[in-house]
């Protein structure tokens, strides 16, 4: 028995190991150097050490002459002490990896060494590309840092190239790895489901790993949004302290993981989730990861939000900062039940109220399988002439004749089983052999990894736009996530599915934009289930949530505002009792909440009383007077709906001469106490501002119409009188 224990028993089928050669590949030594990636007010400092390892030393405020970082180390063993800038599984590394590669011989070690780097400037952006290589396998990685100077935003992504002769498998292929040093790290992130998007959650990170992830395939922002804020060394503050914000520009599965190591350093690895996606990379091929958008500010959460918003208006959102029209959307006012007559009368009412566009939502298509509810018709994009015998052009032209633009809804990524498309192209549906294709909202999802499906989805957009020369806007919806994942098109290569599904969708977006740069497009996914900087570069705006209740919207819009800009945040006034929550609030309160984004209405205008109509006219008119601030001003959140009874925010023009202030009383507890004091921000202390309340018969502020110094408003405060929950006020401030 004892002898048996010591004997080697060959496992069945396993080959006798070859004699191993112990020759090691020599990595050429390099001259140590520091590489600084700078924006106007931030610095990312990287170091190449003598072995050629690229390390991250600093991200935050400018820390003087970068050469002082030369030979900087974090203690311990110099070579292994400083955090690796893009850690790969293997070598001396055993933290969380950004890259993990399986090579054809079964080995899984990668060690990346510095080859060289270069920088190029274009406009306000300096791009630094650092080339790394694994000398054993030949695998190459470029780390690309796009430093947006004025906005203080740095985009990071990697390009992984298989320079070997055989295919490799990418098991983890993150966009970036970033290291921060602080005594503690307060993570703010955003969770939500349908109708509860962007709910803020906060947690103090502890040692070990915290992961934000989506494995839904699409509808990636239901659950977690791929974005966060990290407050360093203090409590969450809007106005002061160091904060780093990050947002991944990817609409598919993502993973952002935070790990604090033994030395209390934080490492953040972010990118596409490797879930079911061990991605094959053929010899000579390369894989480009999506951008991770980072910013830093020492002006608290307000500072990083403003940086992100400025960047988004210039780069992150299609035509960001352009004023998108106010609109009436047919959905909550008509749902699937309408005729041409219904639509024309809604258009009349929208025009009378001073709105600027009418959007025909779901329900206009499907002939053999009419879209009279959500059970049929998706996929069959011909006009339902039983509902609209005169056709779309007739309705769109009517809208134009009334001075309105016209928009129309599509959901081209989906198919109802009850449709001609499902019968004609069963192989276009996401599915796994032999398994049930699960339905969600009675629909299946089309396989965007298949180029024929990409052509079809593009064709839906193309054909819809060609229904009338008067189509100005498309609402692009997508109402379910991926289940039973798999692609008949990809055959044996199912590992590619999640990544190529999203790349396929992006190809369609790019084609759409190439052909239709001027059509405004809204990104909708059962409300806000696809609100990320991956999609927004092709979309003018997003549908923030199907929850149109102003009470819920306050939190949803607050969370959204921490990362995404108001110019893209669609916000609609709907009927009461609210269709999602049953809550009843005043029309004024509903307008005051919706006016903090791109204002729209989504109800049957005929249901409004004459008084309410007059109120609507007034709110829409006044909104047009200050909306340039909502679209392009700097956002200051004065108080948070999470902290107390009041929420308040303001948008301030770049020259600080004009501002619009929104105040909401969310809970009223006591008649005997005085008014709540809001301390304004962003104003010029030395300027005098005239303050005019909007949308009200009777002002709720004693100083309405008078002028005050910016210093008084910011330091002394501003105290409108609210005496009930769910009341609100909007004030325009204009310097004299
Ligand atoms: C979900 C969207 O979020 C709604 O606004 C509406 O367009 C419906 N889909 C239509 O089916």
Image (cartoon, rainbow, N blue to C red):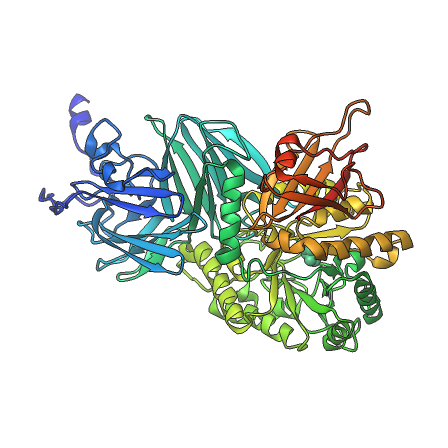
Residue in the foreground of this view, choosing between 108 and 594: 594
Q: How many marks?
A: 0
Q: Is 196 left or right of 588, judged from the image as shown?
A: left
Quarter of the image with the N terminus in it: top left
Residue in the foreground of this view, choosing between 459 and 435: 459
Rendered view: 381 above or below 94: below
Return the x and y of residue 255 as percentages of the image width and height.
Answer: 45, 43
Return the x and y of residue 61 as percentages of the image width and height.
Answer: 38, 38
Q: Is 441 left or right of 52, judged from the image as shown?
A: right
Q: Is 474 left or right of 289, judged from the image as shown?
A: right
- In the rendered image, which quarter is residue 85 located in? top left
Residue at the image position 29 percent from the left and 48 percent from the top: 102
Return the x and y of residue 6 as percentages of the image width and height.
Answer: 16, 26
Residue in the foreground of this view, choosing between 373 and 427: 373
Return the x and y of residue 9 as percentages of the image width and height.
Answer: 20, 34
Residue 324 appears in the picture as rendered: yes
- In the rendered image, which quarter is residue 679 located in? top right
Toward the right, the furthest residue is 610
Q: Is 12 left or right of 539, judged from the image as shown?
A: left
- In the rendered image, which quarter is residue 285 located in? bottom left
Residue 276 appears in the picture as rendered: no
Residue at the image position 61 percent from the left and 36 percent from the top: 711
Q: Quadrant of ligand 1?
A: bottom right
């Amino acid at each position: 028995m004892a002898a048996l224990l010591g004997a080697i028993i060959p496992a069945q089928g396993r080959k006798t190991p070859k004699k191993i050669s112990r020759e090691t590949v020599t990595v050429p030594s390099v001259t140590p150097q520091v590489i600084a990636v700078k924006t106007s007010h931030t610095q990312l400092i990287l170091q190449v050490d003598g072995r050629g390892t690229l390390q991250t030393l600093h991200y935050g405020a400018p820390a003087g002459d970068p050469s002082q970082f030369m030979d900087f180390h974090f203690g311990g063993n110099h070579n292994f002490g400083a955090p690796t800038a893009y850690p790969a599984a293997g070598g001396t590394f055993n933290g969380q990896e950004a890259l993990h590669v399986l090579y054809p011989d079964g080995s899984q070690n990668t060690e990346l060494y510095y080859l060289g780097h270069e920088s190029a400037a274009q406009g306000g952006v300096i791009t630094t590309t650092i080339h790394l290589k694994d000398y054993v396998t030949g695998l190459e990685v470029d780390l690309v840092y796009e430093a947006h100077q004025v906005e203080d935003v740095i985009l990071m992504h990697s390009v992984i190239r298989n320079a070997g002769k055989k295919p490799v498998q990418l098991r983890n292929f993150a966009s970036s790895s970033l290291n921060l040093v602080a005594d503690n790290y307060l993570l703010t992130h955003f969770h939500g489901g349908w109708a509860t998007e962007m709910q803020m959650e906060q947690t103090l990170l502890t040692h070990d790993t915290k992961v934000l992830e989506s494995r839904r395939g699409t509808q990636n922002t239901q659950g977690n949004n791929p974005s966060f804020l990290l407050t360093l060394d203090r409590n969450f503050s809007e106005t002061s302290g160091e904060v780093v914000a990050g947002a991944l520009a990817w609409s598919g599965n993502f993973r952002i993981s935070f790990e604090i190591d033994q030395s209390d350093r934080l490492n953040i690895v972010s990118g596409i989730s490797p879930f079911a996606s061990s991605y094959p990379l053929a010899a000579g091929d390369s894989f480009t990861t999506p951008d991770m958008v980072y910013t830093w500010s020492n002006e608290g959460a307000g500072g990083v939000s403003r940086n992100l918003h400025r960047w988004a208006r210039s780069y992150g959102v299609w035509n960001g900062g352009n004023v998108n029209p106010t609109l009436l959307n047919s959905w909550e006012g008509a749902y699937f039940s309408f005729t041409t007559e219904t639509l024309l009368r809604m258009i009349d009412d929208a025009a009378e109220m001073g709105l600027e566009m009418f959007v025909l939502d779901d329900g206009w298509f499907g002939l053999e399988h009419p879209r009279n509810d959500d059970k049929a018709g998706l996929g069959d994009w011909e006009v339902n002439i039983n509902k609209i015998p005169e056709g779309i052009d007739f309705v769109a032209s009517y809208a134009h004749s009334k001075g309105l633009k016209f928009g129309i809804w599509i959901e081209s990524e989906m198919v109802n089983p009850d449709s001609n498309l499902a019968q004609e192209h069963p192989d276009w549906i996401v599915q796994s052999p032999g398994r049930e294709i699960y339905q969600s909202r009675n629909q299946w999802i089309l396989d965007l990894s298949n180029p024929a499906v990409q052509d079809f989805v593009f064709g839906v957009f193309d054909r819809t736009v060609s229904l009338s020369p008067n189509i100005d806007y498309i609402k692009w919806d997508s109402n379910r996530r991926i289940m039973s994942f798999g692609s008949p098109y990809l055959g044996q290569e199912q590992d590619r599915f999640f990544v190529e599904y999203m790349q396929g969708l992006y190809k369609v977006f790019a084609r759409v934009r190439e052909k239709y740069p001027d059509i405004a497009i809204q990104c909708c996914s059962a409300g806000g289930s696809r609100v990320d900087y991956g999609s927004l570069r092709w979309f003018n705006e997003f549908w923030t949530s199907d929850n149109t209740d102003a009470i819920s919207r306050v939190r949803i819009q607050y969370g959204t505002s921490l990362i995404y800009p108001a110019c893209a945040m669609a916000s609609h006034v709907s009927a009461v009792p609210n269709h999602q929550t049953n809550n009843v609030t005043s029309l004024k309160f509903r307008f005051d909440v919706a006016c903090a984004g791109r204002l729209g209405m989504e109800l049957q205008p005929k249901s409004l009383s004459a008084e309410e109509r007059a109120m609507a006219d007034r709110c829409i008119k006044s909104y047009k007077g200050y909306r340039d601030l909502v679209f392009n001003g700097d956002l200051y959140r004065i108080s948070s709906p999470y902290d107390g009874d009041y929420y308040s925010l303001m948008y301030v023009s770049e020259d600080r001469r004009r501002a619009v202030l929104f105040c909401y009383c969310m809970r009223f507890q006591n008649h005997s106490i005085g008014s709540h004091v809001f301390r304004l921000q962003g104003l010029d202390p030395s300027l005098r501002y005239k303050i005019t309340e909007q949308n009200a018969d009777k002002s709720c502020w004693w100083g309405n119409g008078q002028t005050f110094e910016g210093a008084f408003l910011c330091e002394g405060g501003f105290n409108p009188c609210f005496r009930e929950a769910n009341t609100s006020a909007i004030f325009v401030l204009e310097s004299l």
